[in-house]
Amino acid sequence: MFGLIGCSKEHDIQLKPGVDDNFNLTSASAIYNSDLEQVVMSMEVQGLAGGTTPTPLGQLDGASVFGYVFPTTLKSNDVGFGITEGIVAMALSGIHTGFY
């Protein structure tokens, strides 16, 4: 499981001034759950996760979509891509506002 088996990582995050409380992260963790055989990723925000939503536009072109991103320490070749600079990030996003 990309070197995550049997380990957990929790990271406290500094609040960023001027950021919407619903996006201002207070903590994030990635813990391998052997019962589920999965890495369980979680984040906490200062406000209410999902409490801020984009304005519906009714079309895809120009529509906003909000999401949360988990940066990781994985390299692209750890997950089957070619060797390149940068890291792998996993994202969670809501329904695209173009579909409203």
Image (cartoon, rainbow, N blue to C red):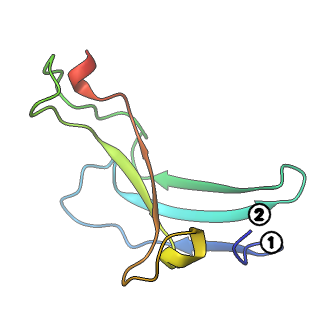
Task: Tell me, yes or no, if residue 22 can be seen here.
Answer: no
**Of 98 and 25, which appears nearest the observer?**
98
User: Could you tell me how far apart the alpha carbons at marks 1 and 2 are, in whole angstroms?
Assistant: 6 Å
- Asked if residue 44 lies left or right of residue 60, the reply is right
When asked about the image quadrant of residue 95, the answer is top left
Residue 37 x, y percent position in the rendering: 83, 55
Query: Label 1: few (<14), some or many (≥20) within 10 Å?
Result: some
Q: How many marks?
A: 2
Residue at the front extreme, as displayed: 82
Q: Is residue 85 above or below residue 98?
A: below
Give me the residue at 26% from left, 37% from top.
65
The secondary structure type at the circle numbered 1 is loop
Residue 69 x, y percent position in the rendering: 41, 57
Looking at the rendered structure, the kind of residue marked 2 is Tyr
The secondary structure type at the circle numbered 2 is strand
| Residue at image mark 1 | 5
Query: Label 2: few (<14), some or many (≥20) within 10 Å?
Result: some
**Of 67 and 21, which appears nearest the observer?**
67
Task: Tell me, yes or no, if residue 7 can be seen here.
Answer: yes
Give me the residue at 39% from left, 45% from top.
47
| Residue at image mark 2 | 32
Q: Quadrant of the N terminus?
A: bottom right
Which numbered disc, 1 or 2, marks the residue that appears first in the sequence? 1
